[in-house]
Image (cartoon, rainbow, N blue to C red):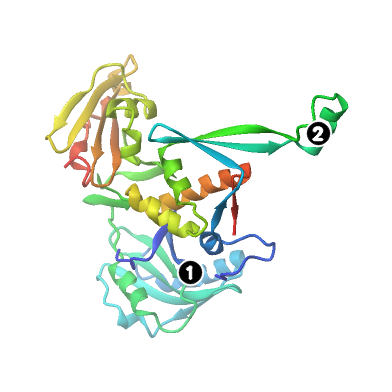
């Protein structure tokens, strides 16, 4: 199997595991107790909604604030995102911390990272 | 079966197994139906014709490597080399003389020459249970033994929740593994965790085991059925496996009319119920 991306530009499993997640700069973190964390981030309105808001003159703000609460497992992964650890390292540490099978940890962590990426909370390098 | 440590199970089906390694696919095992002793060459011809037609895969029989692997006399073996445009490798048709089942082992070796030492090791260690004795299952850290009559019916491997379901005549056995237990048991107790995942009766559970590995047990009879043979008896047992950081549970269901006894669930899982 080739280690390079396929012809459609999608990353294969090995490239994806080697990529390094980086946190977005505009995120506020609030710890709630020991086991959870609230992330607050800005979301921009879609261009169409921005136009509608301008038409109805409901202020000039381009976006709104959203919050995400991470549980104990999510906090563990979030703390491992430091701009240096690649996905594979995060998976291995997560598996070791929670005594999980490496494949199970891989699926959990990659799904979690994907959901963070969709929200714009992290990017991949 | 003895497989290298870096191989991991990728796909598990009722009639096939797929192993992956770091650099890609490693082995595919297919349970290919009935086998008649002494007719392996015929199977090979049919197999070669069929895969050529369905998958445009070329299959060429190899005869020279047969004597290099010391196999149990109950197995008949025929080696072959296979190739498709993207990859190639070796394989072996294995027919069990006892249970008369045919297996196809296809190795992704990127070479069609003589088998590698690890290919020979896997083939030499491959055994079929033949439906006698206990079936041993080892999947993602879940280790259990089932009576030989049980067949894998379905499975589900989701992060944090594994389920393997077995069926035999009038009986059903379902194994669950939930984790990480340290997280699940942070705010809830074992009973609550089990109740949120499995439909259990409102009665209080019984307890068993020792101080190191206590477990909870429920036993109940399902639905008020008019005839005895329609009644189902259920037993559910769950415990916290500290070593594996998982919550393990087994449920057995028995239809009363067959006179089968409920299984000794506590003895079936290794590392779970002690």
- Work out which quarter of the rendered image holds the C terminus of chain A and state it: bottom right
Residue B260, picture quadrant: top left
Q: Secondary structure at mark 2?
A: helix
Relative height, residue B112 to residue B43 (above, below): below
In the orientation shown, which residue stands out farthest toward the right?
A55
The image quadrant of residue B191 is: top left
For label 2, the residue is A50
Q: Position of residue A45 (x, y in %)?
A: 74, 35
Q: Can residue B156 be seen in this snapshot?
A: no
Q: Is residue A111 left or right of residue B130?
A: right
Q: Closer to the camera, A76 or B10?
A: A76
- Same chain, labels 1 and 2: no
Residue with the mark numbered 1: B23
Q: CA distance from mark 1 to mark 2?
A: 47 Å
Q: Residues within 10 Å of mark 1 (few under 14, many from 20)?
A: few
User: Circle 1 marks a residue in which chain?
Assistant: B
Q: Is residue A51 left or right of residue B84?
A: right
């Amino acid at each position: 199997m080739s280690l390079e991306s396929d012809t459609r530009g999608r990353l294969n499993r090995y490239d994806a595991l080697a990529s390094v997640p980086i946190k977005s700069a505009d995120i506020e973190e609030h710890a709630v107790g020991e086991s959870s964390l609230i992330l607050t981030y800005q979301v921009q309105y879609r261009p169409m909604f921005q136009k509608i808001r301008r038409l109805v003159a409901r202020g000039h703000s381009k976006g709104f604030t959203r919050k995400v609460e991470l549980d104990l497992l999510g906090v563990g992964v979030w703390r491992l995102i430091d701009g240096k650890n690649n996905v594979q390292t995060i998976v291995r540490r997560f598996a070791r911390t929670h005594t999980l099978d490496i494949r199970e940890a891989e699926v959990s962590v990659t799904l979690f990272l994907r959901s963070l990426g969709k929200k714009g909370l992290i990017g991949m390098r | 079966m003895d497989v290298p440590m870096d191989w991991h199970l990728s796909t598990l089906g009722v009639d096939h197994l797929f192993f992956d390694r770091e650099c890609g696919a490693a082995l595919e095992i297919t349970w290919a139906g009935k086998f008649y002793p002494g007719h392996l060459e015929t199977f090979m011809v049919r197999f070669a014709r069929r895969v050529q037609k369905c998958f445009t895969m070329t299959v060429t029989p190899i005869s020279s490597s047969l004597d290099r692997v010391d196999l149990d006399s109950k197995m008949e073996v025929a080696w072959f080399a296979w190739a498709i445009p993207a990859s190639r490798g070796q394989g072996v048709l294995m027919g069990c003389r006892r249970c008369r089942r045919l297996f196809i082992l296809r190795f992704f070796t990127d070479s069609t020459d003589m088998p590698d030492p690890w290919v020979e090791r896997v083939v030499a260690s491959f055994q079929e249970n033949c439906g006698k004795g206990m079936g041993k299952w080892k999947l993602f850290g879940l280790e259990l033994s089932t009576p030989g009559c049980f067949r894998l019916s379905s499975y589900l491997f989701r992060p944090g929740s594994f389920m393997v379901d077995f069926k035999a005549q009038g009986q059903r056995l379902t194994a669950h593994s939930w984790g990480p237990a340290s997280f699940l048991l942070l705010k809830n107790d074992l009973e609550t965790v089990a109740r949120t995942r499995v439909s259990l009766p409102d009665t209080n559970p019984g307890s068993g085991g020792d101080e190191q590995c206590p477990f909870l047990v429920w036993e109940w009879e399902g639905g008020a059925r008019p005839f005895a043979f329609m009644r189902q008896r259920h037993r559910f047992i769950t415990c916290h496996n500290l070593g594996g950081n998982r919550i393990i549970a087994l449920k057995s269901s028995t239809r009363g009319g067959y006179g089968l006894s409920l299984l000794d669930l506590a003895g079936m899982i290794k590392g779970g119920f002690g």
